[in-house]
Image (cartoon, rainbow, N blue to C red):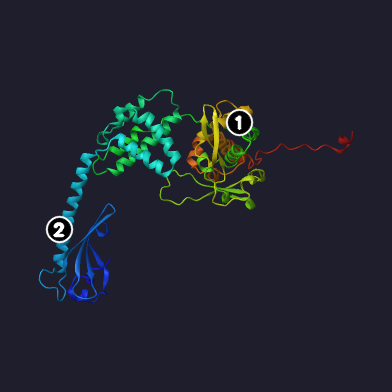
Amino acid sequence: MAQPSTIDSAAKRAKLAPNKNPYWHGISGGRGGVSLGYRKPARGPGSWVAKLVLDGKRSEERLTLADDPGAGSGALSYPAAVTAAIQWAKARLASIENAEADDTAVRAPTVRSAVETYIAARADRAAAAGRDAGSRLSKHVLSDSEFAEAPMARLSAAAIQAWRRRLTKELAPTTVNRLLNDLRAALNASTDLHRRSLPPSTAAEIKSGTKAISAASDARKQVLPDAEIRRLVDASFAVDGSGDFGRLVLVMAATGARFSQVARITVADVQVARSRIMVPPSQKGRAGKRPTPIAVPVGADVVGRLQPVLCGRRGHEPLLLHWYKKQTGPAEWERVDRRPWASASAAIRQWAAARDIAAAPADTVMLCLRHSSIVRALSAGVPVRLVAALHDTSVGMIEAHYSAYIVDATEEIARRAVTPLAPTEATPLRPVSEVAA
């Protein structure tokens, strides 16, 4: 941006090099407000240009000629051009605000519009996650017409809580919290988009109304001994002759990663020479950020059982595939092609079969592989911060859900530093003759 001294007089403007882009100077609000520009042609007088930047959107318009030599009548001096630019910006701003007001009047945001927009955005980012969130929100939010049709402008914490009381009591606390997370994200996105037309208190009402309910952590009952984890892995290979499901469970158990992360591992992510897997991080809260893979060490046995899907394949291909089947009759299925795992629901039947073979508790879920991996690391004395990093979560989350295991692990580490401090009783000396006797 040019300094005032370069464009505020004809003599100074004459020294500027010809340029098709204007020499800009902010006159109100700096780069994010109103600017006056001077466009210097190769020959003849230059011209004034006004610019307005609002919410990241840019508007420009040529005003008139500058009072350079040969400009003739109607040319504006620098002070007059500043006044003209400000007047143009005010008119342009009023036009934008009127257009937004008309648009808001026609399409006043509601809870329904917020949720539908959110579902579409989730589906664009990840089809499987979009379907999952869409199913949950459609069933429990959009089906409640009283809540769904509520205008965002009048949304309150009380209205959200009234909807929560109408939810079926059969929903588990963790399911309710997942639903609240999706709803909060949808409402916050709509609040940000329509912030000019919504009350300032809307965000606070959403935060208060969608607070998570207290759900006792089920991490402890889902933590299995290493022997049981090995039985589940072996059973997973047994239920699927192709080994596809077995390799999925094996990688989840070895890395402690979420299903969505494991599904995105590529062939190149398995670094055989270094006995580690580069696990893609979760996509939560990382919009616009380049993900950094997490290097997770694994045993030689894990690498060995992955060899069949490593040989002869290109590095960018998904590591874990499975057969996609199409139903051709009442009880007939036909293999179509091999595809990456889309969601955990695609493995529900195989997990149930493996669980039965391994004689695991009936309520054991695949997430037990992650819980067990975290506890295994804590029990081995791995620092909490490193455990959190390896499992793509926060120290706070580890402390909140695995505090008992942290206490056990740190107590064992602290016990190694215990030094005898109490004075020991002196051993009385006895004559040699008495010892010999």
- Depth check, mark 1 against mark 2: the one in front is 1
Q: Is residue 410 visible?
A: no
Say if mark 1 contacts mark 2, CB within 8 Å: no
Q: Quadrant of residue 5?
A: bottom left
Quarter of the rendering occupied by the N terminus: bottom left
Judged from this view, the residue extending furthest toward the top is 169
Mark toward the start of the polypeptide (1 vs 2): 2
State the image coordinates of residue 402 (x, y, percent, origin top left): 53, 35
For label 1, the crowd category at 10 Å Cα-Cα, with few meaning under 14, some 14 to 19 and many 20 or more, is many
Q: Amino acid at mark 1?
A: Ala
Helix, strand or loop at mark 1: helix
- Residue receiving disc 2: 87
Out of 371 and 133, give the one closest to the viewer. Answer: 133
Q: Amino acid at mark 2?
A: Gln
Q: Quadrant of residue 10?
A: bottom left
Q: Quadrant of residue 309?
A: top right
State the image coordinates of residue 179 (x, y, percent, origin top left): 40, 32
For label 2, the crowd category at 10 Å Cα-Cα, with few meaning under 14, some 14 to 19 and many 20 or more, is few
Residue 299 vs 146, above or below: the answer is below
- Residue receiving disc 1: 354
Determine the residue positioned at 40% across, 23% down. 168
